[in-house]
Amino acid sequence: MNYLIYTYGCQMNYSDSERMETYLEALCLTKAKSEKEADIILFNTCSIREKGEQRVLGKMVDMIKLRKKNKKLIVVITGCMVRKSSSRYSEKRDKLFNRSREIDIALRIEELPKLADLIKELDPKIKLKKIKEETLEDYFHITPHFTSKSQAFIPISTGCDKFCTYCIVPFSRGREKSRPMADILKECEEFVKQGGKEITLLGQTVDSYGLSIFDKQEGTFKDLPKGKTPFVNLLEQIDKLYSKGLRRLRFTSSHPKDISDDLILAHGKLKTLMPYLHLPVQAGSNSLLKRMNRPYTVEKYLGIIKKLRKTVPDIAISTDLIVGFCGETEEEFKETYDLFKKVEFDFCYFAQYSDRKGTYASKNLKDDIPKKVKLERWHAINELLKKIVSKKLPKFIGKTVEVLVEFEKAGMLHGYSEHYKEVQFKGPKSIIGQIVQVKITKATQWVLEGEITK
């Protein structure tokens, strides 16, 4: 049998797909080059926004056409859209089966080892290598099929306990659970041993690693050294891999509630920790933050930024922002705009609020900001971001930065600097995956250009 995976959403989903590939190949399946060659097509989904789900369900039209040529085609939906692992023949099925007739299997990603049995529910004659059903912890023991030899995205936790009023993640991914530190370190060590240079740790809120209700009940992290959070302990252990070849350590995403002083200090001490932090603020108004159930104030957020820049003066900071959230007044938006202007973020992933079924906001708050107003506010923040970036990027001209070369496009090599600035330059494809010195000669709207130094 041949398989094909479509991945949607965040880096966590892409990391899950890497584990999925390992599992499927353990079942003796082969990766297909196209849909036409595939016997099983898996959609690893994101449900942060309703549009993401509609995009996946829209692909089911293509599955109808494919089935006409391959009547034995198996369609699997996994990832954030799934609540219950089941097949079309299961007694208790996921609600997704009511939304499309083309779905054969719904699979919770952490229950990946159940896939073989679910396939056999469809057709008992299909022969697959038997793999023992395992728990969430064992799912993380599956060695990922890393798509890059130089970069790895390694999950350290799953789920979320924050319950922001606009977010579906606690319902789609479940409650927050952290991986044992020993397992994470083993995966990091294996990656570095194979020549890996950059590791990005993943979690819905990485800085609460080891601190969730589940973690405390399990007592997994009770024997760690006192005086530091479990997350900083983890960063320090991974940093020791510098002597074995690791050069870069990043993580995403942080939550302002859990940013600790020892984490801030770690940015100034650890050799591998890059001078970059993604710290979602979502809004710059205390009343908005309260409606979003973001348990921090604007003052606390600004205090974190101040400490970070005192520890690492040139640290690059990006954020997430929502405009047009339920009831957002002109004054509240102005407060957000002023915060953005004050912090001078290096980059921002911002969106116009859209109602997400299943969330607290959808059930209890009114999506009452007109689309025209949302769009105006989006453009206002976007223009402000452009002004800030156009002021910051030229400061790199004349400087030499280290770039991890990631890909080639239109005759130019592309990669990211220590501060997570995209850099493009000319060079041989043979250096993809290497860290090289690049002298910056030009700054465009979003990208730096340069030349490899001798």
Image (cartoon, rainbow, N blue to C red):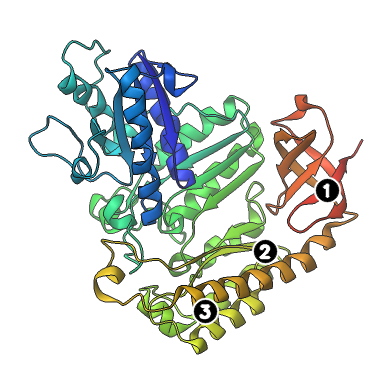
Residue 72: give x, y in percent of width and height: 27, 17
Q: Which residue is at a point 66% across and 78% down the rendered structure image?
A: 341
Q: Which of 99 and 255 is in front in this view?
A: 99
Above-or-below relation of 422 to 373:
above
Residue 196: give x, y in percent of width and height: 61, 31
Viewer-nearest of discs 2 and 1: 1
Residue identified by numbered label 2: 346
Tell which residue pokes out farthest to the left in this image: 91
Tell which residue pokes out farthest to the bottom in this image: 331
Residue identified by numbered label 1: 449
Q: Distance between the residues labelled 2 and 3?
A: 16 Å
Q: Quadrant of the C terminus?
A: top right
Q: Residues within 10 Å of mark 2 (few under 14, many from 20)?
A: many
Name the side, left or right, on which 219 lies relative to 289: left
Q: Which of 1 and 112 is in front in this view?
A: 1
Residue 260: give x, y in percent of width and height: 49, 66
Q: What element carries label 3?
A: loop
Earlier in the chain: of badge 2 and badge 3, it is 3
Q: Distance between the residues labelled 3 and 1?
A: 33 Å
Q: Which of 149 and 11 is in front in this view?
A: 11
Q: What residue type is labelled 3?
A: Gly
Name the side, left or right, on which 125 lies relative to 203: left
Above-or-below relation of 417 to 229:
above
Residue identified by numbered label 3: 284
Q: Is mark 1 on a helix, strand or loop?
A: strand
Q: Is residue 344 visible?
A: no
